[in-house]
Image (cartoon, rainbow, N blue to C red):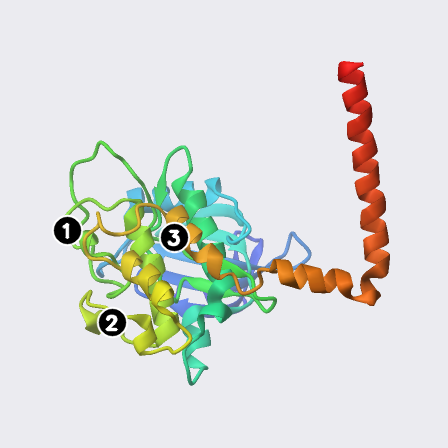
Amino acid sequence: MATLIEGNTLKDRYKIVEVISDFQDLSIYKGKDLESHNSLVYIREIKLDSKGYGKFNQASLDLLVEISSSVSHRCLPKFIEYYRGVASGYIIEEFVNGQTFAELLKQRSSPYSFNDAYAWMIDLCDLIHYFHSQEKQIILRGLTPETLLVTPSGDLKLISLDKARYFNPLKETSDTLFVWNPGYTSPEQYGTQKSDVRADVYSFGAVFYHMFTKQNLGAMHFNFPPVSKFNPSFNAEQDAIFARCLHKDINQRYQSILAVKNDLLPFNPHKASDEDFADFLKDEKNESFKEKMTKILKKIKDSFSRIYEWLFD
């Protein structure tokens, strides 16, 4: 149960405005930072004395704090500070207004189309790559529709790093994780072998498969029909991308998230074609733009001419 209620103040600085969610080992609050013009914050209370499954211990909490405080990306809430209480730890982050993928999907009568979610897919690829390219490589392991939030302006945010860990290539033991998110956890995370960056590739595919189909992934038992079976906006090539993300054989899956992104890029719905640009230049309304570009190109040409004369005269 949550140990703080509306009106309480944490550390004489953070005033509780609302209890957002409350679980046995984790409570999340919306608060005001009294020392920063009452700006809104997230307060994550991690309870160390929980006896339920999935509980945090001191080592896992220390790891969460270390990772949360060391990363910075446009798709992450800003870390503010960590406060250690008597039986709980408190991670304070900037408050990000918006709705999770899970909440957005519940409001829809039909799944998202490929084009609707394209920008989110590219942003999530970039974010996952950011974690995978750290000097101490970070594996997220906990991507679900509940951990991804969309702001009112459409920006993507990852709001939980609870399952993240550093990847140790020398560690031989496999991952044995409880099924806290069936369908989104890769097969190898159920104790069969050690998970690596390809586990996050699987979770990426699972999250968007759910967005594109509205199906219960846990009930599919790792056997995913083509997305196009549930969503007519998909073609065979797009089906193939998600089939490869979700492959049960880790060696048949995409080997990096950048490889996923590279296969997504040709389907950019906002990509301007050569014909689009030609039509743009033909439009009389764009005459001022053409004049400006002509002047800029002339300056560039003149600059290169002077450089050439300086080098070879």
Left-right relation of 87 to 44: left
Left-right relation of 179 to 104: left
Q: Is residue 176 visible?
A: yes
Q: Quadrant of residue 96?
A: bottom right
Q: Residues at badges 2 and 3 in contact (C-beta under 8 Å)?
A: no
Residue 272 percent location from the top left of the image: 61, 60
Q: Amino acid at mark 2?
A: Pro
Residue 90 percent location from the top left of the image: 44, 52
Q: Farthest residue toward the top?
A: 313
Q: Amino acid at mark 1?
A: Gly
* Above or below for 2 versus 107: above
Q: Nearer the viewer, mark 1 or mark 3?
A: 3
Q: Nearer the viewer, residue 312 or 221?
A: 312
Q: Which of pointers 2 and 3 lies earlier in the amino acid sequence?
A: 2
Q: Mark 3 sits on what residue?
A: 260
Crowding near the residue tagged with mark 3, few <14, some 14–19, many ≥20 C-alpha atoms within 10 Å: many
Residues at marks 1 and 3, CA–CA distance in whole angstroms: 25 Å
Q: Mark 2 sits on what residue?
A: 225
Q: Amino acid at mark 3?
A: Val
Q: Nearer the viewer, residue 277 or 73?
A: 277
- Residue 191 is labelled as 1
Q: Which of pointers 1 and 3 lies earlier in the amino acid sequence?
A: 1
Q: Farthest residue toward the bottom?
A: 109
